[in-house]
Image (cartoon, grey):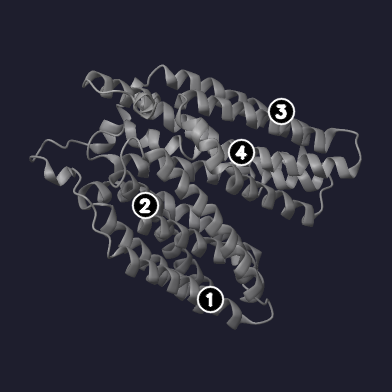
Amino acid sequence: MRRIHVGNALSAFGLGFTVPYLYVYVAQVRELGAMTAGLVLAVFAVAALIVLPFAGRAIVRRGPLPVLLTALVTAALGALSLGLAGGATAVLLSAAALGAGQAVMQPSLATMIVDCSTADTRSRAFATQFFLQNLGLGVGGLIGGHLVDTTRVSSFTLLFAIEAAVFLMLVAVLATVRMPHSPRISDAPAGSAGSSWRRLLGNRAMVQLCVLGFVLFFACYGQFESGLSAYGVEAAGISTSALGTALAANTLMIVVAQFAVLKFVERRRRSRVIAAVGLIWAVAWVTAGYAGLGHGSQEMATAAFVSTYALFGLGEAMLSPTLAPLVADLAPEGMAGQYNSAFALVKQLALAVGPAVGGPLAASLPAPYVVTFLLFSVGISALALRLGRKLSVAQDQPWAAAKSRVVARGGAPAETLAA
């Protein structure tokens, strides 16, 4: 598990190392124009949407580790070729390889965590994963920003070469992991597997969770660097330095609050935790509304805008030990890879649609923008409570189910033993 967490941190570090500078690299350093730079960012999303449906099946059949190693090598080749590419075609093909590799890493690592954890330790494992991902992204972006120089192509070539080296180093680290045997579709008798996607779509609780996940990612992550930032600049008059402070406040809240909220979250119904996140994000949107539509001073508007990002971070810290373990517990035996990939696909769709809708709406109609996403946040709470009615006790309250199993076997709950 420690090596898997190292893998999560390094993969996030590699992502944060280069992705924030892709647009500048393609449009200005390589002088390929804004259109090509926009296409590169779109290729990242399209590549993920194409490979994720196949990745889930591959993880189920082959196991997460071989799929992860293949994704890492693909991403390394994509990063290295991107740093050397001079023409539009080469840049787009390289971006496709890098985007596809990075997209497959997420469900592969999540499935490895599922296979190496128990119901009792899974929430903490995914909370640690999210903590290290944000730390890796922040550190990678900080170091990458100090290495690049827009006047020298060689500085970006070095940046992408280091990213490729990080991915290959990760291959060496994770190749030593010995995964416990878990059921695969290939282990089952011939003809018994059926259509894995049809089985997934037949799981009504999982379908409802995917709908809920789409709204979550659309209303939060899909707005961070598009709609919400455009709203802050256009409606609230936030400076670019204040926007950077807001993004830092979001990361800082996650890093500080992650393990503080974990104990609270672990003993609550997962559906109600998600519903609480919807309410917290509703407060965040009200705060954003004050920042852009209120009549206070510029300092108050800036403080409110920074608080909005911090409140989003608090909600994210509550979701990290909740959503991913719930996906794992909804998956039938041997299907965790398929379910993780399906949920990653939903997330990718939301991240593709969110900026396309939020950006123009925030720039042109700031008041309707805030009201729209305030309603989306309230909708998150309603969808979460509705999902809770479809979940078993083991899925919604795993700690309570574990306690019941101990009592049924004639033992005593951990608290009683400790007392």
Badge 1 amino acid: Gly
Which element carries disc 2, helix, strand or loop?
helix
Residue under label 4: 314
Work out whether mark 1 precedes mark 4 in sequence or the reverse, and give the earlier one. 1
> Residue under circle 2?
109
Q: Nearer the viewer, mark 3 or mark 2?
A: 2
The tag on residue 371 is 3
Real-space CA distance between mark 1 and mark 4, rounded to the nearest whole angstrom:
42 Å
Say what secondary structure mark 4 lies in. Answer: helix
Say whether disc 3 or disc 2 marks the residue closer to the N-terminus. Answer: 2
User: Residue farthest to the left?
Assistant: 189
Residue, disc 1: 87
Q: Is residue 64 placed above or below 282 in the rendered structure? A: below
Dot 4 amino acid type: Leu
Say which element carries label 3: helix
Q: Give the crowd class for mark 4: few <14, some 14-19, many >=20 residues within 10 Å.
A: many
Q: Which of marks 4 and 3 is nearer the N terminus?
A: 4
Give how far apart the Cα atoms at labels 1 and 2 are: 33 Å
Q: How far apart are marks 2 and 4 (CA)?
A: 24 Å
User: What residue type is disc 3 on?
Assistant: Val
Q: How much space separates mark 3 and mark 2, taking CA atoms? A: 37 Å
Mark whose residue sits in front, 4 or 3: 4
Instruction: Describe the element under mark 1 as helix, strand or loop.
Output: loop
Mark 2 belongs to which amino acid? Leu
Say above or below: 389 vs 315: above
Looking at the picture, tell me which residue is in the foreground, 188 or 116. Answer: 116
Could you tell me residue 323's position as x and y percent? 45, 35
Between the residue at mark 4 and the residue at mark 3, the CA separation in whole angstroms equals 21 Å
Count residues near mark 3 (Cα–Cα under 10 Å), then give few for <14, some for 14-19, many for 20+.
Answer: some
Work out whether mark 1 precedes mark 3 in sequence or the reverse, and give the earlier one: 1
User: In the image shown, does 161 or 397 lie closer to the viewer?
Assistant: 397
